[in-house]
Amino acid sequence: MFQFESAAAGRHFAGSVRDVSERHAVEKLKQEFVSTVSHELRTPLASIRGSLSLLSGGVLGDLSDEAREMVAIAERNCARLISLVNDILDLERLEQGRLQMDFAKVRVAAVLGRAREAVFQFALEREVRLEMDATALEVEADAGRLVQVLVNLISNAVKFSPPGSAVRVAVGEHEGRTRIEVIDRGRGVPAAHLSAIFERFRQVESSDARDKGGTGLGLAICKAIVEQHGGQIGVESEEGEGSTFWFELPGEPAPDLLLESFRVADGRPDVLLADHDTALLGVLARQLLSDGVRVRVAMDGEEAERAVHEAAPRLLVVDLGLPDGEGRRLLGRLRAEERLSLLPLLVYTEQDIDERLQHELALGPTRFLTKSRASDAEVRRVVYAMLESEAREAHS
């Protein structure tokens, strides 16, 4: 949009609007296709791997040396394909916010120790030394996922390091954040590849997948994990001099930036989610957003009531476990207003609710789900069914 001069009175602006809905629909179909194919591949691949293990183990009879070599090649490629499928599914869950993160206070030294154990044998075979800084730092993180990031970065460093060299993991603080660096003396990354190295299926050389192994998804997964921790990841490299892959994590738990962005009004939402469980709220919001549902979120009863008055949603989803019993009080106040007492409502809470209390809580069309028994898929089915019902009522 830009401002322009005109002989007519007043200020004049011009702009353009591009409809990208078709592009988003195609992207969504592509992601669903990849996810479906990946899920369908897992079972037959596991069966193939098991059958090859039986052959190589001699369970079905002795093999000639040539046959044993062929089976070993098939096993290696089957394992590589399984790794690719698992990476695709991991990346899909991360990008849609469906990969559960278990945040807790974590000692960085313990994470480094687990990562070292995982790659030690690989480094030994490549004749590469592992050097890790001692540290007393702690971070708020999912320990298992941090180990996954480090194993990937260290394995890559070892893979591209010459025999007799060392890979060093350095730990320090930078502007209030914990910074971890994986430093190697390998061939380095050409400047032309630096900006795209964290994208899907990116490898520095096309021959790397064949010669060095790997799927080209590891760094994309690392980036997604670090960003879900509220951190940043990057690389500094000079061709022929080695590389430093680094990531930084906040000293304090980072707010979910997506949730924060949907705590303000942006037109009438399809769904208002009122829940104090930010992890669950983040998962559900991302799932609905990926399906094109307009979402607004609220963390307590007062915020939810303010949001309803600003722009009444087509469907209100409330957790009765909002702080200080605000869930019930919120519904009581909405019932007292004639216009809002007819809002479609989904009560999604920790405990079962008896019929008497259900009657007291109901607004317009109302459904009740118990968190411990309702799967994510069931919650989404109920939400979509209620939105469809509301749309039919609005047009009847």
Image (cartoon, helix red, strand yellow):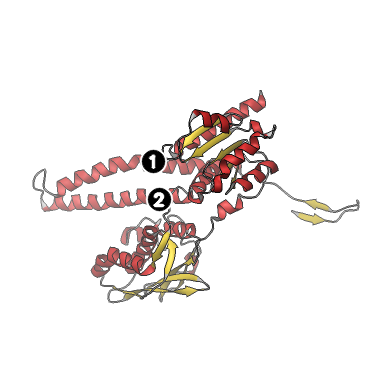
Residue identified by numbered label 2: 90
Where in the figure is residue 265, as x and y percent of width and height?
Answer: 67, 47
Q: Earlier in the sequence, mark 1 or mark 2?
A: 1
Which quarter of the picture shows residue 359?
Answer: top right
Which residue, as the protein is rendered here, is positioned at the far left? 62
For label 1, the SS is helix
Q: Would you say 217 lies left or right of 322 here?
A: left
Seen from the viewer's position, the closer of residues 211 and 305 is 305
Residue 37: mark: 1
Q: Is residue 210 visible?
A: yes
Residue 124 vertical placement versus 368 (above, below): below
Please tell me which residue is depicted at 60% across the width and 45% down the height of the picture: 301
Where in the figure is residue 171, as x and y percent of width and height?
Answer: 41, 73
Amino acid carrying label 1: it is Val
Amino acid carrying label 2: it is Asp
Where in the figure is residue 68, as x and y percent of width and height?
Answer: 15, 51
Which quarter of the picture shows residue 138?
Answer: bottom left
Instruction: Tell me the distance, in whole angstroms, between the alpha carbons under discs 1 and 2.
Output: 14 Å
Which quarter of the picture shows residue 2?
Answer: bottom right
- Between disc 1 and disc 2, the foreground one is 2
User: Are there few (<14), some (14-19), or many (20+) residues within 10 Å of tag 2?
Assistant: some
Where in the figure is residue 175, as x and y percent of width and height?
Answer: 53, 73
